[in-house]
Image (cartoon, helix red, strand yellow):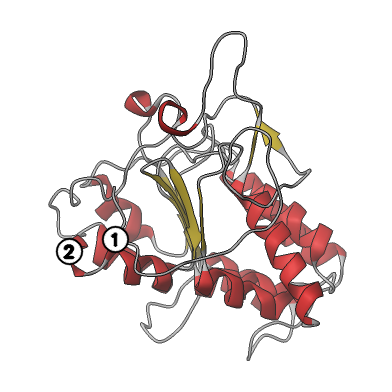
Amino acid sequence: MALKTKYSLGQTTTTSTSTSSTTTSTTSTTSTTTICCDPLVLCTTTTANPLPPCVNPIDFIFDIINKFSITNGICFKDSIKEVLDNGFITNDCNVCCPDCTYVLADVITFLKYADAVLNLNGSLPPLGAVEKTGSNASDIDCCLNNFGFSGLSENLELVGFETCCNNFNQCVYNIIQHFADNNCETGPTGITNLAQIIKRLLTWDGDINSHGGIVEQGAFDGNSQLCLILENFIKFSDDPCFVEAFFDLLTTGLVIECFDGQVFIGSIDLYLDIIGPSST
């Protein structure tokens, strides 16, 4: 899918040995199976000179959020929306691609994306709107898992989605367990105990003005990224009870998509602004 980029979305600063582009390098989790970007366009790769393991873009963007927080002297929570709303486009061949367009959000934020991009009226999505970008893209079906909106999965079956990612439920449980282990009781307005935290994460009341539930479209090598997101929150957050920060991430929404040999990472609002009205 060719994004009609209107902005210079991000300036990164350090070096990479696998490509001449400027990117931010990290020492975080790598993958050996998902091929990054478009190596035929950007990277010289042979049997004698294979691509190195690529950096998961979840690790990539959390590292940037953390550096932004430190550089600007603001808390980690407040850095999340700021960084995602500015977004990044990188052509670093060290950054992995998702199996297809990756989206993480709560239900109402995901529906904003779905209404614009997926055409949830029973028709097929716009050509390329859910581009399969993994190393075995032709063999991969986009998948979707969620808590909070049973009708969402039913609608998406009409446009070729499947429920997959066997570890999705386990990762959501791990997030809840972390909040319980740390005696977390507060979060966004109205949340005053763990039961309300769990309810906000697992359910949505159907009100278009309220947030709740969790939706994950796409995967990396068939795996949910929620466990990795939890690890990054534990690693970087200045508050062990990062309930509000986690819900801010879901409210903002996260999109990761590979296109034209590049990787886009940003918020749902920014993504929809860039692709423009032609996607609807």
Q: Give how far across and how far down residue 206 sits, in percent.
A: 37, 77
Closer to the camera, 245 or 24?
Answer: 24
**Measuring 76% from the left and 72% from the top, which residue is drawn there?**
242
Q: In whole angstroms, how far apart are the C-alphas of marks 1 and 2?
A: 10 Å
Three-letter code, disc 1: Lys
Expressed as whole percent of the image width and height from the top left, the position of residue 85 reads 51, 74
The C terminus: image quadrant:
bottom left
Mark 1 or mark 2: which comes first in sequence? 1
Disc 1 crowd rating (10 Å Cα; few below 14, some 14-19, many 20+) is few
Q: Label 1: which residue? A: 4
Residue at the image position 25 percent from the left and 57 percent from the top: 118
Q: Nearer the viewer, residue 280 or 241?
A: 280
Q: Do the residues under discs 1 and 2 have CB atoms within 8 angstroms?
A: yes
> Residue 125 appears at what percent x and percent y?
20, 51
- Disc number for residue 278: 2
For mark 1, give the secondary structure: loop
Figure check: 115 above or below 219: below
Q: Nearer the viewer, mark 1 or mark 2?
A: 1
Q: Relative to 74, say whether 261 is above or below.
A: above
Instruction: Name the residue type under label 2.
Output: Ser
